[in-house]
Image (cartoon, rainbow, N blue to C red):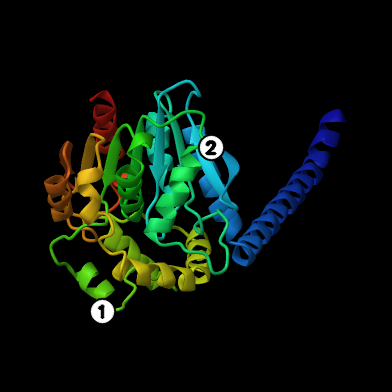
Amino acid sequence: MAAAQRLAGEPRSDARRRRWRRIVWLSLGLDLLLVIGLLAWKPEWALAAYVAVQRWQAGASERTVEVEGQRLVQLEAGPESAPLVVLLHGFTGSKENWLPLMAALSGEYRLVAPDLAGWGESQRLPGADYGVRAQAGRIAAWLDTLPRPPELLVGHSMGGHIAALVAATRPEKIRRLALVSAAGVPFEENAFGRAVLAGGHPFAVEDRASLDRYLGLVFADPPFVPWPVDRAFIRRRIADRDFELAVLARLRGEERFAVQPLLGQIRAPTLLLWCEGDRVIDPSAAAAYAAGLADSRTVLLPGCGHMPMMEDVAGTAAALREALGR
């Protein structure tokens, strides 16, 4: 009798389990659709999550300071007592460009990477001057907010131009300098330079196709940017377009080679770090810098483009370690 009751009860139990499985899968499916819908509506959340993972890997935290009436936001990582290294991003870049390198070096150095005034999360004031000379003045003032002078000031692309100007005009603040794919001096003509001088904006991003072109220009091996992170990035670049064009007009005009006549004033030992495949600032710029500097060393990395700190993290980290040991 008991066996008969068990046999009679099994179909009802199986049916209940099937119903519960359908309910669970339906709930998961609805949750997934809700997440997809939210990310389609607010793709910035996906970008924020992606950046948060990178910050966690680097052990980086965020801090806000005020310099000359403007709010600057910076990333910090590494032991507070370790040698201090400052990292300046380039045109259309942000402090987050340095996160892969920060992850590699944060066990050895104290690393601080600000968003330049007007860029990223830092404040942008209407009518303010965001040319390289004005930015160099702000960075010189910002260095005074740090607990001690940096052992090494690193600048990439436009950030390299700014770093070189700081080293030339305020040499007492800079012990060592690293210029990474740096603008500010003449270099052999390339398609990027011709487009800029013709009034174009080769870095412009307004849709997925132009995003892919941009990544193909600055990377030798472009990273894949998944949906919806790509949408968030595209939205940000569209919002910044007028600002980028205004800064670019300064960079192609009177400030194009602002540091060139000042190179003899740079006393700091300088690392000139380029990728052999840089299609933005041709590696010949390293020779132009070296010709005017009293103490420099050039390192050319193979197999990468305009973003060595992201594309060849190990090579960049090794070069900076050596520069710090000089």
Residue drawn at (35%, 51%), measured in percent from left and top?
Answer: 162
- The answer to whether residue 308 shows anywhere in this view is yes
Among the 4 quarters of the image, the one containing residue 314: top left
Which residue is tagged 2? 145
* Mark 2 residue type: Thr
Asked if residue 236 lies left or right of residue 209, the reply is: right
Residue drawn at (33%, 46%), measured in percent from left and top?
Answer: 169
Asked if residue 122 lies left or right of residue 176, the reply is: right
On screen, residue 73 above or below 326: below
Instruction: Please tell me the numbered disc located at residue 103.
Output: none
Dot 1, crowdedness within 10 Å: few (<14), some or many (≥20)?
Answer: few
On screen, residue 230 above or below 143: below
Circle nearer the viewer, 1 or 2: 2
Asked if residue 200 lies left or right of residue 102, the reply is: left
Among the 4 quarters of the image, the one containing residue 290: top left
Q: Secondary structure at mark 1?
A: loop
Q: Secondary structure at mark 2?
A: loop
Coordinates of residue 306 in the picture (x, y in percent): 27, 54
Measure how far apart labels 1 and 2 are at the Cα level: 40 Å
Asked if residue 236 lies left or right of residue 152, the reply is: right
User: The N terminus appears in which quarter of the rendering?
Assistant: top right
Which residue is tagged 1? 198
Which of the pair 51/145 is nearer the observer? Answer: 145
* Mark 1 residue type: Ala
Coordinates of residue 214 in the picture (x, y in percent): 34, 65
